Amino acid sequence: MTEKEEYPLKKVCIICAKGNLEDVYAACVMANGAVMEGIETKVFFTFFGLDAITKKQMNHLHTATVGNPAMRMPNGWAFPSVLGMLPGVEAGVSSIMKKQMEALDIPTIPEFLEMITAGGGELYACKLATDMFKLKKEDLSDEVKDIITVGEFYGLCGGQGTQIIFT
């Protein structure tokens, strides 16, 4: 029997393409965890994921209540998709989630971005998406290193022991 050679994880390149609260937090938690483990970390924000690094949007992310079959209310009962369409429900659910995260002392998105970069992680914005949404570098968090193309991002993702993660 031959042994399979294993390579340690040296670098993670995370692509954040969604702007809802749960997906942005997933990207931030994974990036921060990688930085804390000493893993080289790069995060690429594209399309609606740009909301996580846009100064005007980063503190106003919402939880997707429509079309989310896994949506659960805090007490554990399933959340019927039709209820999510009612006015104010998405804002209410988002508020509940934010309060629960605050009670657990989970950092805010701006705090996570600071923690990631303070630990050596790098944050990038997608040039195509920023052009589409007419965003400039000054519209983005100061933690964003640069606005780059997807090709430039892939250029940063090479090397043995690298994983690309799409959230």
Image (tube, grey):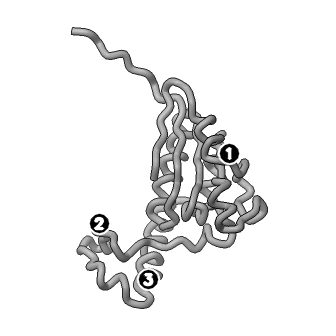
Q: Element under label 3?
A: helix
Q: Marks 3 and 2: which is nearer the front?
A: 2
The residue located at (48%, 67%) in the rendering is 20
Numbered label attached to residue 92: 3
> Disc 1 and disc 2: Cα gap in Å?
33 Å
Q: Element under label 2?
A: loop
N-terminal label among 3 and 2: 2
Mark 3 touches mark 2? (CB < 8 Å): no
Crowd class of label 1 (few under 14; some 14 to 19; many from 20; radius 10 Å):
few
Numbered label attached to residue 118: 1
Amino acid type at image mark 3: Gly
The answer to whether one can see residue 99 in this image is no
The answer to whether one can see residue 57 in this image is yes
Query: Could you tell whether 69 is left or right of 89 in the image?
Result: left
N-terminal label among 1 and 2: 2
Amino acid type at image mark 2: Ala
What residue is shown with label 2? Answer: 70
Amino acid type at image mark 1: Ala
Q: Marks 1 and 2: which is nearer the front?
A: 2
Mark 1 touches mark 3? (CB < 8 Å): no
The residue located at (67%, 61%) in the rendering is 130
